[in-house]
Image: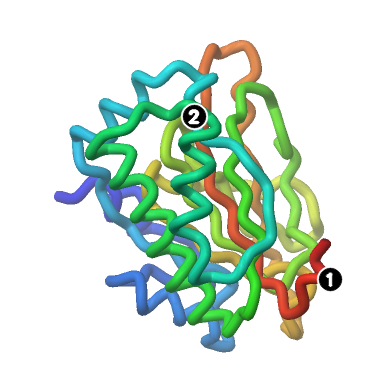
Amino acid sequence: MNPAREVVKDAVIGVGVAKSPETLSVIRSPSCAAAIWPRQQVPEFQTWIDALDPEELPRARMILRPDAVRDAALQICEASRTPAGAERDRLVDDIAALADVFSGVMRAKWLRLRLDVVTTNACWKFHTDAVTARLICTYRGTGTQYGISTDGAEPGRIFTVPAGSPILMRGTLWPEHPKSGLLHRSPPISGTGETRSVLVLDPIDDREDGA
């Protein structure tokens, strides 16, 4: 059985499982608060990115048009001294592909792109982001955790998105009534020695508004 599908097969009501990147558009269904595209990373890629020195992992924050993401991702890797080669090319291509799919689903003219390297308990409290929607893909380390809460408290049952599997979640600015109660967090990893490499994409209608 595909391990990624095994992890999300019991996902909570309101979390859709996309069979392809294009079907992440299920997020627009009335009862869908989030969508996950379960996939397995290529073993060679996972071995490569897991072995990188944390200082070599790409990191940056910028606002740009979707068609500029690939060139930007390549420049970010070069600036971060991410070793060149087939696996870096695979990473750059994947970032660009996810940006293309996400901008299409959200009909976004601009994207806020963030590549984070996380070694602490960043955003470890369960919350909903103050955006229309957000795509998160963890390339290295423990994936985003989520669950349902009816009162804003920590969910009683916590799910973890597999590494390499993007999750698309509605934010507080999504015109949704009633609210789904879906909360998420970055997994608490402080003191474990773990390093996470995470891609975050937000839709922006106007570049000045997103600055």
Residue type at mark 1: give it: Glu
Q: Is 118 placed left or right of 74 in the picture?
A: right
Judge whether residue 127 can be spotted in this image: yes
Q: Which residue is mark 1?
A: 208
> Where in the figure is residue 30, as x and y percent of width and height?
58, 88
> Where in the figure is residue 77, as x and y percent of width and height?
47, 37
On screen, 95 above or below 88?
Answer: below
> Along the polypeptide, which appears first: circle 2 or circle 1?
2
Furthest residue toward bottom: 30
The residue lying at 72 percent from left, 83 percent from top is: 176
Residue 11: name its quadrant: bottom left
The residue lying at 84 percent from left, 71 percent from top is: 208
Q: Secondary structure at mark 1?
A: helix
Q: How is the image coloured?
A: rainbow
Camera-side residue of 105 and 66: 66
> Where in the figure is residue 164, as x and y percent of width and height?
37, 46
Residue 57 numbered tag: 2
Camera-side residue of 16 and 91: 91
Tell me whether the residue at label 2 lies in contact with that at label 1, contact meaning CB atoms closer than 8 angstroms: no
> Where in the figure is residue 98, as x and y percent of width and height?
43, 63
Mark 1 Cα shell of 10 Å, populated few (<14), some (14-19), many (≥20)? few
Distance from disc 2 to disc 1, alpha carbons, whole Å, reads 29 Å
Mark 2 Cα shell of 10 Å, populated few (<14), some (14-19), many (≥20)? many
Residue type at mark 2: give it: Leu
Camera-side residue of 157 and 112: 112
